[in-house]
Amino acid sequence: MFKQVIMIFVLAVLLSLGARVFQENPVSFWGFPEPIKLIEPKGAIAAPTRISPNEAFAPADQPYAIDYTTTMGLYSKRKRENIHFIDSRDPELYAEGHIPGALNIPFEELADHIAKLNAIPKDQIIVFYCDGGDCHISHDLAEYALSNGWRRICVYVGGWEEWCLESDFVAKGDEARDGE
């Protein structure tokens, strides 16, 4: 009996590993999905040979990876260029501090906040961020946005951790205000 149980277990493991080969998007072997792959912008918006955000972030099938300098450049042009910042962290963390003007759309509560995302025109630039480092909920929210028609998506990879260390622009409270 024990020998049969072991044999069934070994066959199940081999079958599941074999099935991974034929899957278009296989589940990660260790059970944690890989974050969506990010691409580089088409040019610098904050360098001496800078280009406009519209040129740097053309519609794409993958989100753009952006650093602090690029994020700050987009932040400075956010009102003039219709650039939107989305904080994908929990509301409690958002209330403790966030990028001024950022909307809070926590990925874990997306269904409750979907109207905020749907209010953003699909041809405008959206910058998603979370805590940075090992936090990938901004990647997940960017992947959701891509699958629903937005094509000018950026993920600020340094996230809130880097922003609050490098920038003096920090807002606190529950909701973003237009005057921020």
Image (cartoon, rainbow, N blue to C red):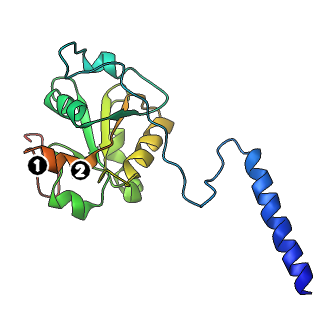
Q: What residue does disc 2 label?
A: 160
Q: Quadrant of residue 45?
A: top left
Q: What residue does disc 1 label?
A: 170
Q: Secondary structure at mark 1?
A: loop
What distance separates the C-alpha of mark 2 from that of mark 1?
10 Å
Residue 167 percent coordinates (x, y): 11, 43
Seen at 22% across and 15% down, the residue is 50
Q: Point out the image quarter for the C terminus.
A: top left
The answer, for residue 32, to whether it is visible in the render is yes
- Say whether disc 2 or disc 1 marks the residue closer to the N-terminus: 2
In the current view of this chain or complex, which residue is farthest to the bottom?
Answer: 1
* Identity, as a three-letter code, of the amino acid under mark 1: Val
Q: Point out the image quarter for the N terminus.
A: bottom right
In this rendering, position of residue 34 left or right of residue 84: right
Are circles 2 and 1 on residues that touch, CB within 8 Å?
Answer: no
- The label on residue 92 is none
Depth order, front residue of 113/3:
3
Residue 164 percent coordinates (x, y): 15, 50
